[in-house]
Amino acid sequence: EKDPVRVLVTGAAGQIGYAIVPMIARGIMLGPDQPVILHLLDIEPAAESLNGVKMELVDAAFPLLKGVVATTDVVEACKGVNVAVMVGGFPRKEGMERKDVMSKNVSIYKAQASALEKYAAEDCKVLVVANPANTNALILKEFAPSIPEKNITCLTRLDHNRALGQISERLKEHVSDVKNAIIWGNHSSTQYPDVNHATVTTSSGETPVRKLVADDQWLNTEFITTVQQRGAAIIKARKLSSALSAASAACDHMRDWVLGTPKGTWVSMGVYSDGSYGIQPGLIYSFPVTCEKGQWSIVQGLKIDEFSRAKMDATAKELIDEKSLAYSCLD
Ligand code: NAX
């Protein structure tokens, strides 16, 4: 049997936390033959509820689950973790200024970066889910300089999966036959969902989505806004934000990163920009990536038309603004 992998989930008493821990304990994230030890972190006001989650994990008798550490102590939570899924954060409440929310999250991610840097396993892979996800990941990177920048990512896989879902619904093709959509940029409403390179596998082979949909007007307007606004649509319907789909996407992100993407398939991940596609280095920006042997690499050489260029630059601009807002909170 393999040695257990230690997986940290912060914000574990919250909605996404409640959805994701059973997925991890069932092997959805790291594979059906990979034992895990869950490290669950939340803050003091949620301590009792966190303990309830731990009780349920015991009650579920998961064969792969070799232990649970449930704590409000960030040092204890980070000790020896190989994978860190950062779901905890300060939510934007009605009437709050953007700067106030940023400032709260900057201080959370600064502190947690230091704890991860000191106590996590050397090869720890980090996925930031909590919003503003890209900028929280950037702060984490800045304050954990000894963690390789390649090990710090943020979640845009939910947006990616939403794009595949919309194409699947429109064409009445199964979602697993749709691939290679791209989410460029920020996990926010400025993200650019791009299907210029996406395909659908049918009985006649792999066909471009643009050809099958045959409605550029829809693809260039409604499709994009539906994906961008999907989070808000879920809140309107459920009176709560996306949780099961976010948890599932976080598992997809980590699984593909650790175990590799299927041949001929790429996925979207928020990663540290190296200047690819003219996106300025020093931002956590969502790109199309393939993964092999636990390493992601940005898909190179895709043709970018003028329409895409403008949208990719607009979402980069928002990230540059967020970055300076975040830095102004550090002073
Ligand atoms: P909840 O409010 O249900 O849960 C958040 C949990 O984090 C709470 O239990 C809270 O006590 C805890 N927490 C707060 N500060 C903490 C700290 N310093 N250390 C540890 N835990 C802390 O929110 P939920 O619906 O679970 O969403 C979690 C985060 O994911 C939010 O920031 C949300 O905006 C973000 N999302 C990101 C998505 C993405 O695709 N990147 C999609 C879903 C989601 O909206």
Image (cartoon, helix red, strand yellow):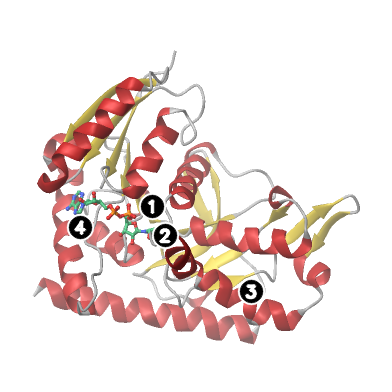
Between discs 1 and 4, the one toward the N terminus:
4
Disc 4: which residue: 109
Above or below: residue 64 compared with residue 162: above
The amino acid beneath tag 4 is Tyr
User: Which image quarter has ligand 1?
Assistant: bottom left
**Which residue is at a point 51% across and 64% down the rendered structure image?**
287
**Which residue is at a point 34% across and 62% down the rendered structure image?**
133
The amino acid beneath tag 1 is Lys
Q: Quadrant of the N terminus?
A: top left
Between discs 2 and 3, the one toward the N terminus:
3
Q: Nearer the viewer, mark 1 or mark 4?
A: 4
Query: SS class of the residue under badge 3?
Result: helix
Q: Residue furthest right?
A: 204
Disc 2: which residue: 271
Measuring from the top left, give residue 252's x and y in whole percent. 51, 45
Measuring from the top left, give residue 243's x and y in whole percent. 41, 51
Query: SS class of the residue under badge 2?
Result: strand
Q: Nearer the viewer, residue 135 or 164?
A: 164
Q: Quadrant of the C terminus?
A: bottom left
Distance from label 1 to label 2 (Cα)?
A: 7 Å
Q: Is residue 79 visible?
A: no
Circle 2/circle 3 CB separation < 8 Å: no
The amino acid beneath tag 2 is Val
Disc 3: which residue: 223
Classify residue 227 as left or right of residue 102: right
